[in-house]
Amino acid sequence: MIRSSPYPVKDLPLSSRNTTARALLPAATRPALAAPVARLTGALLEQLDALLIFVPAGSASEALSGLPHGKLLAARFARQPREPGSSFVAALPTARSATAVVGIVPDGAQPFALLGLAGRMVKQLELQDIKTLGAMAAGCPPRVERACVEAGAAAALAAAFQLPQFKSKRPPGRRLERLPDGWGVLLDDIAAGVYANVVGQIIVRLWIIG
């Protein structure tokens, strides 16, 4: 479970040469990870603003039926065919009107595919309005459950610390992020790293060394 702290993240001390850097940093809060629990209960669900639920593609309906508000989630799942790797949103009738995002885990999904699925699930939430977010897996083998929860936590933390974007992505970044099974996330980050390295080398050679 991830809770957002009311205390803002403070900038590191800046030298007089970098006085403009502070204005470029976005406002942020410091997330905190809560200890894991053995199973999701109705009482715990009442404490959440949102919940990421990972279920296996082969037994998604059965896995959802065993959760709090399982009938509602299973009915929402059955409204239309759900492809492995897809996700859908369901509003839960809790005191905090929690939002559940259900991800359909493909059979034999690798870590990159799980991270890509988790990233798409997190994008379906309005994180700025969420104070407490949970991540869980149901109906999966223990190893897969752990991997799903870790992917959900990683995606949520990455979204919470999103850096500002001042310009649209240059090619091939925009094309790379469309690749399936999590490869888009990986290759897009690699492309961004290459661009950052090139810019950093230019700055070092022209303004610092030169």
Image: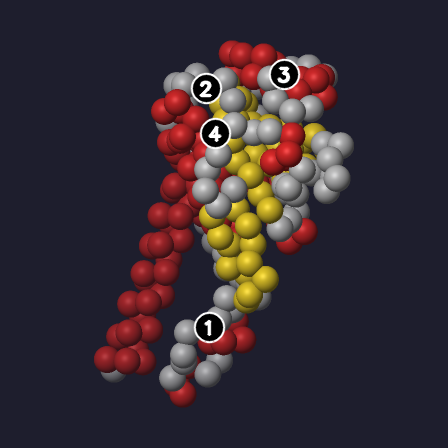
Seen at 61% across and 14% down, the residue is 61
According to the image, label 4 marks what residue?
38
Residue 168 appearing in the image: no
Q: Position of residue 165 (x, y in %)?
A: 54, 60
Q: Earlier in the sequence, mark 3 or mark 1?
A: 1
Residue corresponding to mark 3: 65
Q: Residues within 10 Å of mark 1 (few under 14, many from 20)?
A: few
Q: Where 8 sits versus 4, above or below? A: below
Mark 3 or mark 4: whose residue is earlier in sequence? 4
Pick whichever, 148 or 95, lies toward us: 95
Q: Which mark is residue 11?
A: 1
Spatial separation of the CA atoms under disc 3 and disc 1 = 45 Å
Residue 86 visible in the shown view: yes
The residue closer to the viewer here, 152 or 31, is 31
Of helix, strand and loop, which one carries label 3?
helix
Q: Secondary structure at mark 1?
A: loop
Distance between the Cα atoms at labels 3 and 4? Answer: 18 Å
* Residue type, label 2: Cys
